[in-house]
Amino acid sequence: MEQVFAGFVCGYVLALVSAPLVAVRLLRARAEGGLLAHLLPPTASLVPVALVVHGGLFLVWSGVGIVLGLLLMAMDGAGSAAGSANAAFTLLVASLTLAVVAPVALLSARWRGPAIVGGGLALALFGWLMPHLAEWTSFGSV
């Protein structure tokens, strides 16, 4: 159960960090016209947009964290390597992150930087920190 909670916490942290960055990116893209110019009014402030974006990212990243926590629970007992508490899980998260980030980074020059930064942050939180958080918690002893 510690793994699922660690996944939820990592997902929530990722939502907290990425919400303002995504909101700023959306407001900048609104100025270029297109669909976002119709969805976001010209007087929209950053704070309400960031709150709405955070609500969506909270659901998405926390859900991803819970699913990854269940996978980490299933992969319990794998060996540690390269600073990770569970090397097989870190490799799985790295391959999933690469599968999501690589097409975006290759096909869109505009979203290349944010995709690489977001993928690196997701890999650091889910792939490296999450197994350590699961080891540090002690729900079973309560």
Image: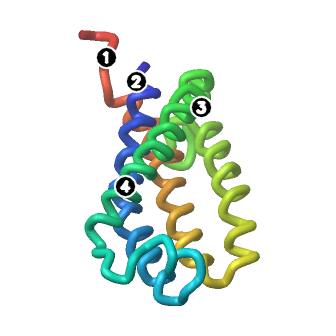
Residue behind mark 4: 54
For the residues bearing labels 1 and 4, Cβ distance under 8 angstroms: no
Quadrant of the drawing holding the N terminus: top left
In primary-sequence order, the first of circles 2 and 3 is 2
List x then y, in percent, for residue 46. 30, 73
Total number of numbered labels?
4
Per the image, label 3 sits on a secondary structure element best described as: loop
Label 3 is placed on what type of residue?
A: Gly
| Measured Cα–Cα span from mark 1 to mark 4 | 28 Å
Q: Amino acid at mark 4?
A: His
* Label 1 – label 3 distance at C-alpha: 22 Å
State the mark number for residue 96. none
Left or right of 8, for residue 68: right
Label 3 Cα neighbours within 10 Å, binned few <14 / some 14-19 / many ≥20? few
Give me the residue at 51% from left, 69% from top.
117
Cα–Cα gap, marks 3 and 4: 35 Å
The residue to which callout 3 is attached is 79
Gap in Å between the C-alphas at discs 2 and 3?
18 Å
Q: Amino acid at mark 2?
A: Glu
Amino acid type, callout 1: Phe
Is 97 positioned to the left or the right of 134 in the image?
Answer: right
> SS for tag 1?
loop
Tell me the SS state at disc 4: helix
> Is disc 2 in contact with disc 4, using a CB cutoff of under 8 Å?
no
Going from N to C along the chain, the mark reached first, 3 or 4, is 4
* Figure check: 82 above or below 132: below
Q: What residue is shown with label 2? A: 2
Q: Nearer the viewer, mark 2 or mark 4?
A: 4
Q: Residue at x 62, y 77 (%)?
A: 112
Question: Pointer 1: what residue?
Answer: 139
Q: CA distance from mark 2 to mark 4?
A: 25 Å
